[in-house]
Amino acid sequence: MRLDSTDREIVAALQGGLPLVPAPYAQIAGRLGLSEGALLARLRELKAAGVIRRIAAAPNHYRLGLTANGMTVWDVDDARVAELGPRIGALPFVTHCYERPRALPDWPYNLFAMVHGASRDEVEAKRAEIAALLGEACKSHDILYSTRILKKTGLRLRKKG
């Protein structure tokens, strides 16, 4: 899909987040000179083409009291990772889960699942739930705890002009 100037304006208008108003898409559409229906149709096209992956809330977990944040890493049997990864990702306490290639001999892990909790004990209990689900398909694991907050943003388009 080739983006036209309207598509780029839509992406630029949304990349900073939705306005906190009762009808955010209508407000953005009005700013861009579009109807709300036209904006939503273009968003569906952009999503179907893979230009936009998702539009979602991104709460600040630290402000929610979730200050123990651990990336759990797992060495899962390659023959089972495609089956087990989605099951781990569907757990209510896993915010994102993905498969990555190992970097042997130093890094044996191929499945990653981010877990948040109010304490390290809570994160450890959640890790134990994942370990139980993985069972014998998991050879080893670890948790990499966050030590500082990094600002997370996606790709940003600059406005021309």
Image: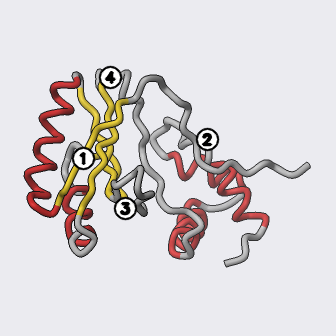
Q: Amino acid at mark 4?
A: Thr
Say few, some or many: other residues with alpha carbon within 10 Å of mark 1 (under 14 / 14 to 19 / 20 or more): some
Q: Amino acid at mark 3?
A: Glu
Q: Which residue is mark 4?
A: 67
- Considering the numbered disc 1 on the image, is that residue within a helix, a strand or a loop? strand
Which one is in front in this view, the residue at disc 1 or the one at disc 3?
1
Q: Residue at x 15, y 63 (%)?
A: 137
- Counting from the top left corner in percent of width and height, residue 38 is at 60, 67
Q: Which mark is residue 104?
A: none
The answer to whether 58 appears left or right of 8 in the picture is left
Q: Which residue is mark 2?
A: 16
Q: Which mark is residue 99?
A: 3
- Closer to us: 113 or 23: 113
Q: Which mark is residue 141?
A: 1
Decide: is 144 above or below 49: above
The answer to whether 105 appears left or right of 5 in the picture is left
Measured in 3D between alpha carbons, the distance from the residue under mark 1 to the one under mark 3, in whole angstroms, is 14 Å
- Counting from the top left corner in percent of width and height, residue 153 is at 58, 41
Q: Residue at x 24, y 61 (%)?
A: 76
The answer to whether 6 appears left or right of 126 in the picture is right
